[in-house]
Structure formats: structure tokens, C-alpha cells
Image: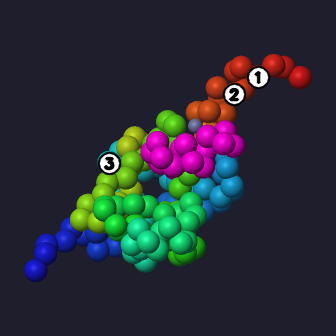
Amino acid sequence: MMKKTKAEDNKINEALKDHLKVKRGVDGLGLFAEQPIKKGEYLIEYWGPLLTDEEVEKKGGQYLFEVKKNVTIDGTHRANTARYINHSCRPNCEVSIKKGRVLVYTKKAIKAGEELGYDYGKDFWNEYIKPKGCRCIKCKEVGTLIAPKQ
Ligand SMILES: [Zn+2]
């Protein structure tokens, strides 16, 4: 039998469950830390039904996470809390793909009240973020600096 770590048995880190909350963020709903969280902690798994490339072609959408050739996780379901984590160009989280599973870890120490974000990658960026402009915390700051004063 395959040995599993404790983190991988839980879709959400039970110890940190009460620390994570979905609420309105910089770009729609986001996932926030209610309490400080240490760097390198496992937080949550991005999960859902597995789709083949053919099914992905038919379905489309923004909540598809390709984990390997011809295997994509459809994370559309609202029970997949990880889908609320927004893209960030200055991410405080990162994903690790292990044996076809997508696990989210903190990349930095997180402060209470901070929104969680990870880098969605170049393909997603070009297709979904570039056309409307990035609304992550980093890009909003840059926007503020260069925007003319009203
Ligand atoms: Zn950005």
C-alpha cells in the first residue's frame, strides 16, 4: 500500500481549518487567513473530478487544473474551497503537484487578515488575466503609483 502523509489524507489542513475563510477580496471572492500561518504549511487541496483532454475541450472554464498529460482536475464545485484562492503576481502560497494531486502550501509567513494567492502560471495569465488586466494586490499597488491623481 502507498504510504500517505497526514496532510494528503485531508483535503483541508484540519489544524488550520478555522484559520481560513472565504470572503470578498481584491477580485471577487478570495480565501483569507484569519490567523497568522507559518511558512511552508500545507493548507488545502485543489480537488474535483478528473477530466480527459477531450472532456476539457467540451467543458472549458477557469477552474480547470491540468496535473499531467490528459488529466485535468475540474475544480468548479464550490466545495473545492481552494478554488477561491486568487492569482497573485507576488504570491504568498504555492502549489505542489504530487501524484496527480494539487496541494497548496504557504510560501511565506502569512499575517492575520491577509488574502492568499498563488501564481496561476503563464497560460492562465495570457488567457484569462491579461485581457481584463491583473487585479492582484501587487498589480493594484503598481496601478496606484502610476495612475494620475484625480
Ligand atoms: Zn498581478
Q: Name the mark on residue 147.
A: 1
Task: Give the amino acid type for the residue marked by disc 2 in the picture.
Answer: Gly
- Residue at coordinates 69% horizontally, 43% vertically from top-left? 132
The magenta segment: 110-133
Mark 2 highlights which residue?
Answer: 143
| Residue positioned 58% across, 33% down in the render | 138
For ligand 1, tell me if the residue under mark 3 lies within 8 Å: no
Q: Residue at x 49, y 36 (%)?
A: 90
Q: Give yes or no for residue 126 being in the magenta stretch.
A: yes
Mark 1–mark 2 contact, CB under 8 Å? yes
Distance between the alpha carbons at the discs numbered 3 and 1: 35 Å
Q: Position of residue 65 (x, y in %)?
A: 44, 61
Mark 1 vs mark 2, CA separation in Å: 6 Å
Which quarter of the figure has residue 2?
Answer: bottom left
Q: Which residue is mark 3?
A: 40
Q: Which numbered disc, 3 or 1, marks the residue that appears first in the sequence?
A: 3
Residue 74: percent from left, percent from top: 47, 70
Of callouts 2 and 3, which one flags the residue occurring earlier in the amino acid sequence?
A: 3
- Label 2 crowd (10 A; few <14 / some 14-19 / many >=20): few
Q: Decide if residue 141 is in sight here.
A: yes
In the shown orientation, is residue 67 left or right of residue 120? left
For the rendered model, the colour scheme is: rainbow
> The residue tagged with tag 2: helix, strand or loop?
helix
Q: Is residue 19 magenta?
A: no
Q: Is residue 109 above or below residue 64?
A: above
